[in-house]
């Protein structure tokens, strides 16, 4: 923004200068505000020149609260969760002009994501300015999660969440606020209310046009209002919020009345839904011009002094922008880097060596159910690493440990600070785990994502965000989370207690997905998840929790089952059955039955769905020449389609017959026993498919 003569007629005055703020500080505030406006305007020019910044949401009209928020943030100490309009916030918080332009131009050296995330999504994790998703308001849960960690580790940091007013309509915002109030967490919710959610006016979004009025009934919440276009009022309000949160009394909410001086973003034409008089009134509330007028009228500086500041800003802006423009673009060959966090603790044992170690345990080894193997491994890992935590629904109620008692005894041993119940709010459960992991790198969080996998759907938005955190931050943040889900049917559970969801989950890049069929694998895969950075979705076939089929000796301590490695459960020569979970045992029963008929079937237990052990699949098909893919989920869209496609593409010359699939019917799982048995794939279904394939 070049200095130019302004027509200041009709500008709203500002007042309320804080008594303890020095003149030099006020001039520095002006320097920052002018630099932010100039940079915001340059971003729009980059877009018009098609040089970058393909998404631009201007901050004009929000600079008062944004400057105050950035100044309140203590770089390298507090945790700041900005939203896409927070250019002024991050500039005041410690990002340089060059770093902001690097983001806008999507350069490889962008501190937020290396060009992987959208422009106007500013971040610098090295000083704790967080990279957030484009799903508006979802970072509220992350702010609450890291605030929980601050309290747990007795820190004096503060989490600051920032968003527009319309984001508060999302259900997860209510979950975040409710949890923060209940736990009295050190988090400030800053709501920048400019009156519009893109084109939707606030009165169509909320019963109260002052959004904060919706939340006065929340216990322990300090609700504060300010004029977000007035730097003095915004500063005093942010300082009051910080003091309240630091006292330990609970979270604070700062409702900032702002204006949107321009369109929502570069793709929006606000003149189509705003009256000219309203737009003109927004200009009269311009935070920058009003601040400039106040400085001149108060005698703090003369016109020449402000012009010098402005000219210095323009020179700085051009110099730093030039450096950013010269930075390299991302290397396309790195597109698959950081999809998964580094596998730093994967067990190096081969399948043969693993089986030998299992056999060498001797007759004295404990034989455990799959459920007990999970319980024992959880306890062992919690003893090994004191920075492990577990929460979820119904997981720590006196002697009960979840619906299936997998977490039984854990709260008694590790205490309510490490093992505790969560509300019935799946998004909250996973979202706070994402935030909690940000506090330190050696934290691992286990969440019972839902009491049954079928109830996990409300958390899908958070699962997607968490899955691409490592990729989106260009390898800067790996949320170490294990999402436990009791999966599958055969228990006469009916709808919401019997579905298999791995096909949907496998479509989300960045998730490791495992499903054990035996107790030893249950323990080994879980231990591997605890020792491998990133997120693992751990699907537990609940039918096998206590079933004799799944009982095995318990693995020796520290023995992992490597993620991404299948196991041959039954060697065979005539055809390969490739399967996982409950259907491993159904396939083994079918194979033994068919052996009496002279059909020798090999059974491959995948154990891991993502990453898929394609090598073991190909080796098995090479030996037998025929492949039957079996899974419990319904056929259409099931993960078996991916397995079959891989075999068809990579093993075509090895096949003596078309690849066959068999799965459950394309229907929800019925509650009546006769319906369940008809819908879910069974041993006889598998046997019939094997006979047909063997005869081809």
Image (cartoon, rainbow, N blue to C red):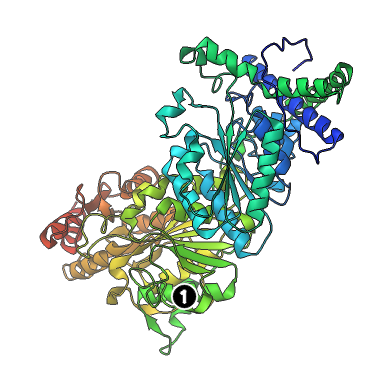
Disc 1 target residue: 410
Quarter of the figure with the N terminus: top right
Give the quadrant of residue 322. top right
Left or right of residue 245: residue 640:
left
- Percent of width and height locating residue 605: 36, 63
Q: Vertically, is 524 above or below 212?
A: below
Q: Residue at x 41, y 47 (%)?
A: 460
Residue 149: x and y in percent read 59, 60
Using a 10 Å C-alpha cutoff, classify the residue at mark 1 as few (fewer than 14 neighbours), some (14 to 19) or many (20 or more).
many
- Residue extending furthest toward the bottom: 364
Can residue 230 be seen? Answer: yes
Question: Do we see residue 351 in this rendering?
Answer: no
Q: Nearer the viewer, residue 193 or 348?
A: 193
Which residue lies at the image location 27% right of the left edge and 67% below the top edge? 543
- Nearer to us in this view, 555 or 383: 383
Q: Choose top left, top right, bottom left or bottom right for residue 139.
A: top right
In the rendered image, the vertical position of residue 280 relative to residue 440, given as above or below = above
Q: How many marks?
A: 1
Q: Nearer the viewer, residue 149 or 517?
A: 149
Residue 497, image x, y percentages: 26, 59
On the picture, is 437 further left or further right than 34? left
Residue 69 placement, left or right of 214: right
Q: Secondary structure at mark 1?
A: helix
Q: Position of residue 362 (x, y in %)?
A: 44, 87
Q: Is residue 370 above or below residue 45?
A: below
Quadrant position of residue 64:
top right
Q: Residue at x 20, y 54 (%)?
A: 669
């Amino acid at each position: 923004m070049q200095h130019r003569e302004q027509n200041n007629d009709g500008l709203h005055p500002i007042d309320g200068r804080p008594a303890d703020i020095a003149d030099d500080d006020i001039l520095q505030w002006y320097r920052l505000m002018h630099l932010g406006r100039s940079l915001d305007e340059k971003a729009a020019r980059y877009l018009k020149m098609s040089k970058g910044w393909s998404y631009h949401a201007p901050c004009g009209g929000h600079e008062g609260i944004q400057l105050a928020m950035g100044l309140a943030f203590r770089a390298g100490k507090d945790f700041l969760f900005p939203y896409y309009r927070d250019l002024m916030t991050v500039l005041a918080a410690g990002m340089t002009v060059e770093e902001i332009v690097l983001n806008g131009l999507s350069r490889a050296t962008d501190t937020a994501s290396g060009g992987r995330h959208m422009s106007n999504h500013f971040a610098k994790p090295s000083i704790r300015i967080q990279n957030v998703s484009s799903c508006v308001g979802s970072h509220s849960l992350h702010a609450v999660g890291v605030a929980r960690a601050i309290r747990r580790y007795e820190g004096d940091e503060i989490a600051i969440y920032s968003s527009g007013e319309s984001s508060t309509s999302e259900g997860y915002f209510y979950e975040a606020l409710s949890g923060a109030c209940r736990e009295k967490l050190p988090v400030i919710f800053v709501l920048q209310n400019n009156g519009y959610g893109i084109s939707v006016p606030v009165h169509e979004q909320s019963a109260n046009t002052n959004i904060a009025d919706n939340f006065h009934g929340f216990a322990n919440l300090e609700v504060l209002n300010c004029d977000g276009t007035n730097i003095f009022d915004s500063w005093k309000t942010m300082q009051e919020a910080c003091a309240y949160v630091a006292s330990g009394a609970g979270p604070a909410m700062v409702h900032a009345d702002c204006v949107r001086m321009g369109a929502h973003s570069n793709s929006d034409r606000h003149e189509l839904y705003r009256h000219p008089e309203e737009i003109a009134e927004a200009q009269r509330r311009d935070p920058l011009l009003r601040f400039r007028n106040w400085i001149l009228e108060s005698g703090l500086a003369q016109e020449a002094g402000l012009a010098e500041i402005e000219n210095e800003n323009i020179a700085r802006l051009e110099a730093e922008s030039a450096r950013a423009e010269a930075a390299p673009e991302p290397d396309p060959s790195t597109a698959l880097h950081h999809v998964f966090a580094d596998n730093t603790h994967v067990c190096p044992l081969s399948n043969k060596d693993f089986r030998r170690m299992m056999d060498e345990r001797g007759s004295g080894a404990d034989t455990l159910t799959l459920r007990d193997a999970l319980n024992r491994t959880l306890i062992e890992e919690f003893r090994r690493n004191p920075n492990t935590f577990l929460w979820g629904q119904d997981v720590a109620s006196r002697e009960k440990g979840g619906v299936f008692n997998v977490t039984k005894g854990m709260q008694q041993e590790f205490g309510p600070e490490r093992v505790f119940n969560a509300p019935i709010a799946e998004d909250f459960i996973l979202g706070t785990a994402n935030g909690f992991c940000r506090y330190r790198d050696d934290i691992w969080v286990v969440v019972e994502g839902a009491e049954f996998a079928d109830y996990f759907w409300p958390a899908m938005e958070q699962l997607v965000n968490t899955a691409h955190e490592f990729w989106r931050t260009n390898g800067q943040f790996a949320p170490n989370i294990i999402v436990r889900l009791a999966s599958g049917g055969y228990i006469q559970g009916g709808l919401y207690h019997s579905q298999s969801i791995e096909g949907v989950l496998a479509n989300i890049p960045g998730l490791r997905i495992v499903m054990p069929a035996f107790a030893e694998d249950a323990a080994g895969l879980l231990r591997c998840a605890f020792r491998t950075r990133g997120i693992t979705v751990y699907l537990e076939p609940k039918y096998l929790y206590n079933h004799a089929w799944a009982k095995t000796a318990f693995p020796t301590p520290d023995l992992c089952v490597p993620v991404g490695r299948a196991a041959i459960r039954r060697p065979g020569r005539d055809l390969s059955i490739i399967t996982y979970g409950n259907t491993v045992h159904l396939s083994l029963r079918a194979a033994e039955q068919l052996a009496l008929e002279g059909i020798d079937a090999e059974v491959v237990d995948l154990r891991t769905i993502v990453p898929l052990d394609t090598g073991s699949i190909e080796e098995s098909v090479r030996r037998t020449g025929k492949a039957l893919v079996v899974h419990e989920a319904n056929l259409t869209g099931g993960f078996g389609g991916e397995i079959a496609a891989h075999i068809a593409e990579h093993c075509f010359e090895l096949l003596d017959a078309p690849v066959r699939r068999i799965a459950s019917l394309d229907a929800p799982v019925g509650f009546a026993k006769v319906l369940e048995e008809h819908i879910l794939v069974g041993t006889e279904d598998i046997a019939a498919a094997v006979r047909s394939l063997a005869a081809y």
